[in-house]
């Protein structure tokens, strides 16, 4: 199977010196996507903890948290989960800004080269 590399060569030629930013852009894209998935995945347990804390006591996740050495107090667990969610979404916002800035620079260079 022959791989056509002409597209990659054209892409590298158009980007010029900005091609050095591509590994960082790919890493940030994957990292931000994973961070979003983790944040969204934590919303359901957070809501379940607020609505019915008794159900959390019966779940296997709560047993895993106790084995990991986290608190057995539900109020503390709610605070920890709140801070974790807040930190994840704040980090996503902080990492998105440079990602979007670099993306806009790359798009601007692509459009100016045409």
Image: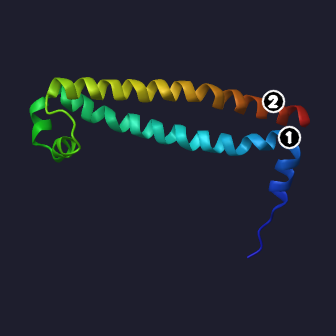
Residue of label 2: 108
- Is 50 on the left or on the right of 2, as rendered? left
Q: Position of residue 80 (x, y in %)?
A: 28, 27
Q: Nearer the viewer, residue 10 or 69?
A: 69
- Is 90 on the left or on the right of 112, as rendered? left
Q: Residue at x 59, y 40 (%)?
A: 29
Q: How many numbered discs, if any? A: 2
Q: Secondary structure at mark 2?
A: helix
| Disc 1 from disc 2: Cα separation | 13 Å
Residue of label 1: 17
Q: Position of residue 98 (x, y in %)?
A: 65, 28
Classify 10 Å Cα crowding around label 1: few (below 14), some (14-19), many (20 and above).
Answer: few
- Is 73 on the left or on the right of 85, as rendered? left
Q: Secondary structure at mark 1?
A: helix
- Which label belongs to residue 60? none
Q: Nearer the viewer, residue 37 or 98?
A: 98
Q: Residue at x 80, y 55 (%)?
A: 8
Q: Nearer the viewer, residue 2 or 73?
A: 73
Classify 10 Å Cα crowding around label 2: few (below 14), some (14-19), many (20 and above).
Answer: few
In this view, the residue farthest toward the front is 69
Q: Position of residue 17 (x, y in %)?
A: 85, 40
Q: Earlier in the sequence, mark 1 or mark 2?
A: 1
In this view, the residue farthest toward the bottom is 1
Q: Residue at x 86, y 51 (%)?
A: 10
Above/below status of 21 relative to 78: below
Q: Quadrant of residue 14?
A: top right
């Amino acid at each position: 199977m022959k791989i056509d590399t002409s597209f990659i060569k054209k892409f590298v030629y158009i980007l010029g010196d900005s091609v050095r930013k591509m590994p960082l852009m790919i890493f940030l894209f994957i990292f931000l996507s994973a961070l979003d998935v983790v944040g969204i995945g934590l919303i359901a347990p957070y809501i379940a903890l607020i609505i019915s804390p008794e159900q959390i006591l019966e779940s296997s996740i709560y047993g895993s948290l106790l084995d990991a050495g986290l608190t057995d107090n539900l109020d503390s667990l709610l605070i920890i989960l709140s801070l974790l969610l807040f930190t994840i979404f704040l980090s996503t916002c902080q990492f998105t800004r440079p990602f979007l800035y670099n993306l806009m620079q790359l798009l601007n260079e692509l459009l100016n080269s045409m």
